[in-house]
């Protein structure tokens, strides 16, 4: 890997298991030459608003200075995605789904003409040949169960922008399974090629 985009979504700091596991994945897949771009989305990002949508649908050369400013963060997020060979995400399940900060990040990352395009056959992702590793943690939700609304959505969203190779490393139902769940996740990380 030449360039990794590392994203953490947990509102917890150092005690966060998803942060610990995502960091271990980054260590596993990187070398001395790997550049890592880190983004913590837990502290909140600007929501997409009407001005931003107007800027998105205005040709770049025709955007006003105000429009360029309104989408500067979105442009940076898109640039980070484009530059990365791999995306590593530390993602806790909050109330059966994702933390709000990550949903906001996804809204800023999904850009028509940048990360996906519309075709006669529907939308097509433009970020091909990238791999995503996601460290998913939960207190009680079992990954893949009928109450897990995170992992199906995440696979769909990443595929929507062109990232189809998604590896989920899970430490699920930690409140019930404790260290056993975390150790199983670490064993999965150790086996990443």
Image: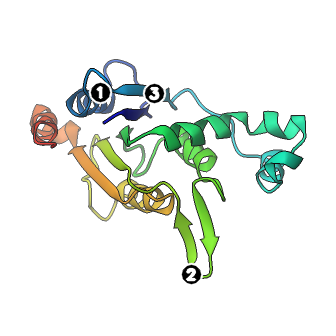
Callout 3: few (<14), some (14-19), or many (20+) C-alpha neighbours within 10 Å? some
Numbered disc total: 3
Residue 121, disc = 2
Q: Is 119 located above or below residue 78 in the figure?
A: below
Q: Nearer the viewer, residue 191 or 149?
A: 191
Q: Nearer the viewer, residue 3 or 190?
A: 3
- The mark nearer the N terminus, 1 or 3, is 1
Q: Which of pointers 1 and 2 lies earlier in the amino acid sequence?
A: 1
Element marked by disc 1:
helix
Q: Is residue 167 above or below residue 76?
A: below
Q: Residue 77 or 180: which is nearer the viewer? A: 77
Nearer-the-camera pick, 189 or 57: 57
Residue 180 as seen in the image, left or right of residue 98: left
Q: Would you call the spot at circle 1 few (<14 residues within 10 Å), some (14-19), or many (20 or more)?
A: some
C-alpha gap between disc 2 and disc 3: 34 Å
The residue drawn where x is 15% and y is 43% is 193
Residue found at x 38% / y 50%: 130
Please, which residue is most extreme toward the top here? Answer: 14
Q: Looking at the image, is mark 1 or mark 2 nearer the viewer? A: 2
Q: Which residue is mark 1?
A: 23
| Mark 1 and mark 3: Cα distance apart in space | 12 Å
Element marked by disc 3? strand
Classify residue 32 as left or right of residue 102: left
Can residue 172 be seen at all in this image of the molecule? no
The part of the image, by quadrant, that contains residue 113 is bottom right
- The label nearer to you, 1 versus 3, is 3
Question: Residue 151 location, x and y as percent?
Answer: 35, 55
What residue would you read off at disc 3? 37
Q: Residue furthest bottom?
A: 120
Q: What residue is drawn where x is 37% and y is 61%?
A: 152
Is residue 161 in sight in this rendering? yes
């Amino acid at each position: 890997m030449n360039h990794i985009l590392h994203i953490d979504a947990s509102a917890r700091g150092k005690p966060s298991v998803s942060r610990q596991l995502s960091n271990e994945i980054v260590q596993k897949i990187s070398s001395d030459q790997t550049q890592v771009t880190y983004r913590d989305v837990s502290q909140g990002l600007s929501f997409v608003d009407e001005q931003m949508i107007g800027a998105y649908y205005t040709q770049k050369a025709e955007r006003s200075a105000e429009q360029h400013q309104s989408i500067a963060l979105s442009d940076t997020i898109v640039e980070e995605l484009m530059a990365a060979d791999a995306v590593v995400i530390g993602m806790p399940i909050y109330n059966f789904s994702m933390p709000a900060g990550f949903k906001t990040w996804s809204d800023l990352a999904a850009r028509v003409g940048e990360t996906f395009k519309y075709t006669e056959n529907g939308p097509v992702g433009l970020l091909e040949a990238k791999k995503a590793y996601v460290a998913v943690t939960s207190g009680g939700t079992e990954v893949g169960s009928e109450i897990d609304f995170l992992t199906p959505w995440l696979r769909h969203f990443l595929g929507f922008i062109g990232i189809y190779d998604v590896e989920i490393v899970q430490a699920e139902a930690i409140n019930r399974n404790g260290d056993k769940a975390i150790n199983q996740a670490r064993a999965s990380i150790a086996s990443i090629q």
